[in-house]
């Protein structure tokens, strides 16, 4: 699993922007890959074209994509990978959601939009994910629309916006990362639509209330 962490840190060094969040998505199928999305905090102009008197607005930097192949003999194997990555990147918590397929009877347009966003899809006019093989990801999204999908989200401290905040977490290294295996064990799902939140980190010192 450290190889995934090394791939993410290599992306950080290449992009040279702080990470806002990391999300992961997989369709509910044993052989469906896990897609990791690195969401950067930054903006860039959509074109280098310069037009006198016309201001071309900047757009968010495209998310980077890492694809992790299965097979996954247990749903919890994906959990282990995401939790280990979040632990190494210094995240304080990880939220996991199991969503139903948006093609099922009774599914709303909001659920369809959430499914598209989970697989790194924007609207027809704006690409939001840097991907040289988008068809495979689109096929996985279509599978998820029928069978449902898993999604994870966390905010990294290492290389992220959150490194600027005051840290009381005694498990973090100086650069916001953590070393060693993740001590947080995966939990079975409690049903579709109900989020599971994994808490990470530790504060061992006594925190006294401030005086009024």
Image (tube, rainbow, N blue to C red):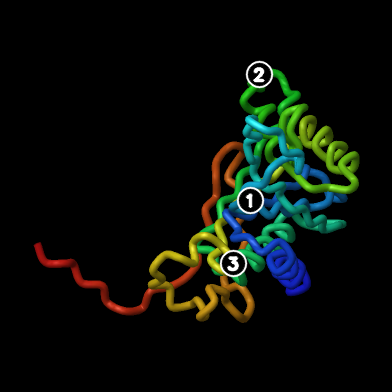
Secondary structure category for the residue under label 2: loop
Mark 1 crowdedness (10 Å alpha carbons): few <14, some 14-19, many ≥20: many
Q: CA distance from mark 1 to mark 3?
A: 19 Å
Left or right of residue 53: residue 146? right
Please tell me the numbered disc located at residue 106. 2
In the image, residue 37 above or below residue 209: above
Decide if residue 98 is on the left or right side of residue 36: left
In which quadrant is the C terminus drawn? bottom left
Residue 69, by quadrant, is bottom right
**Nearer the viewer's eye, disc 2 or disc 3?**
3
**Which residue appears at 42% of the width and 65% of the height?**
165
Residue 113 in the image: state x and y as whole percent: 67, 29
Determine which of the numbered discs, if any, sits on residue 152 in the image. Answer: 1
Task: Name the disc covering residue 159, or none.
Answer: 3
Label 2 – label 3 distance at C-alpha: 41 Å
Nearer-the-camera pick, 103 or 212: 212
Residue in view at x 47 percent, y 70 percent: 201
């Amino acid at each position: 699993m450290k190889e995934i962490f090394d791939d993410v840190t290599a992306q950080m060094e290449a992009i040279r922007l702080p990470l806002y969040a990391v999300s992961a998505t997989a369709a509910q199928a044993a052989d469906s890959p896990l897609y990791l999305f690195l969401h950067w905090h930054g903006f860039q102009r959509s074109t280098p074209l310069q037009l006198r008197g016309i201001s071309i607005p900047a757009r968010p930097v495209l998310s980077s994509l890492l694809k992790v192949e299965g097979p996954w003999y247990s749903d919890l194997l994906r959990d282990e990978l995401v939790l280990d990555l979040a632990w190494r990147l210094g995240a304080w918590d990880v939220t996991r959601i199991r969503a139903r397929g948006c093609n099922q009877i009774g599914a709303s347009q909001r659920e369809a939009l959430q499914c598209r966003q989970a697989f790194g899809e924007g609207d027809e006019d704006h690409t939001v994910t840097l991907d040289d093989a988008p068809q495979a990801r689109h096929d996985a999204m279509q599978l998820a629309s029928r069978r449902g999908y898993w999604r994870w989200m966390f905010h990294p401290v290492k290389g992220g916006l959150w490194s600027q905040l005051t840290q009381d977490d005694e498990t973090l290294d100086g650069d916001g990362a953590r070393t060693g295996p993740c001590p947080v064990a995966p939990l079975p799902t409690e049903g579709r639509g109900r989020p599971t939140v994994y808490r990470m980190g530790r504060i061992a010192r006594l925190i006294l209330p401030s005086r009024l």
